[in-house]
Amino acid sequence: MALTGRIALVAVLAAALIGVLGVFFGIGATTAWWLVAAAGTALLLGAVIDVAVAGRIADLRMERSGATTTRQGETVTVTLAVANAGRRRVRGVLRDAWVPSAGATPRTQPLDVPPGERRRLTTALTPTRRGDRAAAQVTVRSVGPLGLAARQRRHRVRWVLRVLPPFASRKFLPEKLARLRELDGAVTLNRRGQGTEFDSLREYVIGDDVRSIDWRGTARGGGVVVVRTWRPERDRRLMCVIDTGRTSAARVGDIPRLDAALDACLLLAAVAARAGDRVDLLAADDLVRASAEGLSRQEVLPRLVQAMALLEPALVESDAGLVVSEVLRRERKRSLVVWFTSLDAAPVELGLLPVLGALVARHTVLIAAVGDPTVAAMSGGRGDVEAVYGAAAAERSLAERRRITALLRRRGVLVVDEPADVFPSRVTDAYLDLKAAGRL
């Protein structure tokens, strides 16, 4: 049984009335206590009657329908259908509770279901975290006709909303696809490299490289000089490796480092799939947390976002040896390996560098790390003693990152170290630069 606010209001009014009677009519203390007892008994009796005649919550039948997936930050709706299989009207309040990160609104909704009828209640969900956001419990409070007390009971109506990465970097997609079209022959590519293949012949125009002239075609063309055009080869291999270890839990700006890596990976995969290259995914720390292989062009983004949705930072040290062995086992042909990790000195020097040689010997390796703009801003602080000390610490951190970057580049590794706001764009630019140079 649950008491409502109305019974408290009636109790206060009854007490005030007894007080007024005592002041103006001289009612004695004993009589006043008897009146208080009578009022309390009446209220208790009214509450018992209310609960007895209130609609039975056990007679309610509930089921859900609506969205099962959404992107982080987007709003979707889930509908709860409530059917009354009993003989009494159920009138009161319903609370459809979800985990806090699901962003469910409204908190409570009025409920009025006559016998044999059904009502639909809609809850809007705006999730703030990736992963599976589950419905908790549905609590129904059935109020009696007097409104003094109510039955209350909880139902568990299962529903899970899978929240996918937001893919905020898709704003860069038109720009990257335009550059890809330029490389792919929509605008003529006159360079020839290891990763290019013959596309077509066209008439020579001023400014073309004379080395691209096709003399046999020119001879057959009746004096019209023609040149060869080249385009990047398709069906190259790209593996995105995402470090889900403890360093991925650090926040850069408003988001964890892992989320920035996922966003960049999605943009890179979207462009690579459009270019006709094969994209694989490996997420690992001391265990393999997710993988996706052998995806067709149409499957790349749907499969990747599903695999990424449940990824969370693990508070363990990443095993670089495990990652390298998994990449070498999965990718037998030469590939571009884009490894989203950190440039922290200890994990790189103690974990990554000792095993990097075997990977660089077989594949082209790109290390992608998210830079923290707060550190760069701190390095310019000179206002007071605290700011100077902060600037010194920031400069030391930046110098350490530059040292690690130089160390990796001497091992033949490409490095992208950019702030989170441009990080996805810079990683994809590095891929396009390699493709344009014929190094894939």
Image (spheres, helix red, strand yellow):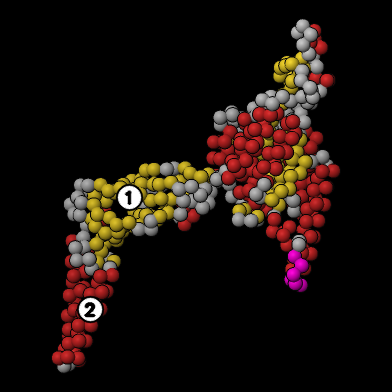
Image coordinates for residue 146, horizontal then vertical, percent? 19, 66
Image coordinates for residue 38, horizontal then vertical, percent? 17, 80
- Magenta segment main secondary structure: loop
Residue position marked by numbered label 2 in the rendering: 13
Of residues 377 and 81, the one nearer the viewer is 377
SS class, disc 1: strand
Of residues 130 and 417, the one nearer the viewer is 417
* Quarter residue 327 falls in: top right
Kindly report the distance in space between the C-alpha atoms of the residues bearing marks 1 and 2.
36 Å
Q: Is residue 195 left or right of residue 153?
A: right
Residue position marked by numbered label 1 in the rendering: 121
Q: Is residue 137 magenta?
A: no
**Residue ID at (69%, 29%):** 182
Q: Residue furthest left?
A: 25
**Residue ID at (69%, 55%):** 372
**Residue ID at (80%, 19%):** 212
Q: What is the magenta range?
A: 381-386
